Image (cartoon, grey):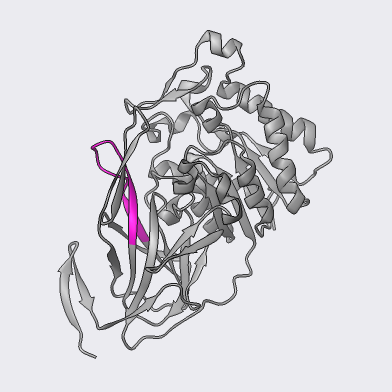
Amino acid sequence: MRVSTKKGCGRQITVRPMQRIGLPDTRVVVAGAVDIDQNGDGIIPRRLSNQWRYQYPLDVEVLASSPSGVRLAFTTDSKSIGVELLATHFQLGTGEGFRAAIDLVVNRELVESLPFSEGNAIVVDAKTGSFDFVAGQPTTVDFADVPDAEFVELWLPSNSTCELRAIHIDADATISAPPPDHRRRWVHHGSSISHCLEAHSGSRTWPSTAAQIGNVQLTNVGLAGQCHLDQFTARTIRDHPADLLSLKAGINIVNGDTLRLRTLAPALHGFLDTIREGHPNTPFLVISPILCPAHEEHAGPSDGSSGTTVALGTPVTEAQGALTLIQIREIVSNVVAARRTAGDPNLHYLDGRMLFHEADLADLPDGLHPNGDGYIRMGERFAAYAFAADGPFAT
């Protein structure tokens, strides 16, 4: 085999003849997805069940195709690996879009994270919520000089949608399906703070970080702005295989002022009831919101158009039942710990401020979303609590 070299990104890259493996292919497992769309060009992993797709609002439709926690898994002896894809990036206004990256994880260790910007863009107006679509081009993200591998995962971006077209490996290399994964299956649902658009990369969101520490399989159903205790999400989780469950709820309810004092507790009960239809005894951890200074004592909705989260609730709306985070935590704790655990000993409650609190404010740049370092710390704290010998996810 003839081998040449080229320089790129400040490093020397080995260039080898390659073979292209179009997707879908049975030798490449799409882990962490709930459903998969296929078109003539490739596959699109989705994190909600297509069975309930007719019920989704447009925002949910887009975000369900953003592959937070999704990874391509296979075994290969190739020294070069590429993933060919057409991404669609989210961009706020005329500024830069979120930094997208593909992570190469070999034998469950992060080897390299490669950023890329090629692809379509959805340009969102932060003030009005309107958006424009800007067409772009597909690309191939190439990893060179891959360490000897028994097991390879390509973790996809948490902050872009991905049409996956092919895997590229050396022309003389082999590829096969990975061995069966017998680790416990963890399904998590939450807001943007679980979707983790601001994370360094897909393997470094807080749920991904916690899953790797806890040595479990992750399906992350975190949906930015869309954790409103919707029944189509509850039914997705109910029908999906799971050995561990978690829900982090409350901040989107405040952000949009979508549930109030009268409606939050019944909605949470209904959400839990639906999931328990399919997983009656599965360990289930319900987490209240992390710290958000603007909304601790002030109700929503929120305005983040200035780059800093501002509470727009008024004494009048609060008197009408608009909720603060202090009230949200009280209601969630009461539903889970006071009302349900007597009859459901596998249901647990965690105050979200145990994962991110006042000492972490330097890593909360917009007053709402942690940055990449903040998400890693959240994942480490979650794992230390949930997977401890006496924790709710103890083996």
The residue at 72%/45% (across/down) is 274
- Left or right, residue 184 beside residue 79: right
Residue 35 horizontal/vertical position (percent) = 54, 60
Task: Return the x and y of residue 91 as percentages of the image width and height.
Answer: 31, 42
Q: Is residue 81 above or below residue 263?
A: below
Image x and y of residue 205, in percent: 45, 49
- Residue sitting at 45 percent across and 55 percent down? 67
Instruction: Please give the name of the residue rendered at 58% of the width and 57% of the height, measured from the top-left corner.
Output: 214
Viewer-nearest residue: 43 or 146? 43
Question: Which picture quadrant has residue 311?
Answer: top left
Name which residue lies at 60% across and 10% down. Answer: 319
Locate residue 283 relative to residue 306 in the image: left or right.
right
Place of residue 9 in the rendered image (x, y in percent of width and height, measured from the top left): 19, 62
Decide if residue 87 is on the left or right side of residue 255: left
Asked if the magenta segment contains residue 96, the reply would be yes
Span colored in magenta? 86-102
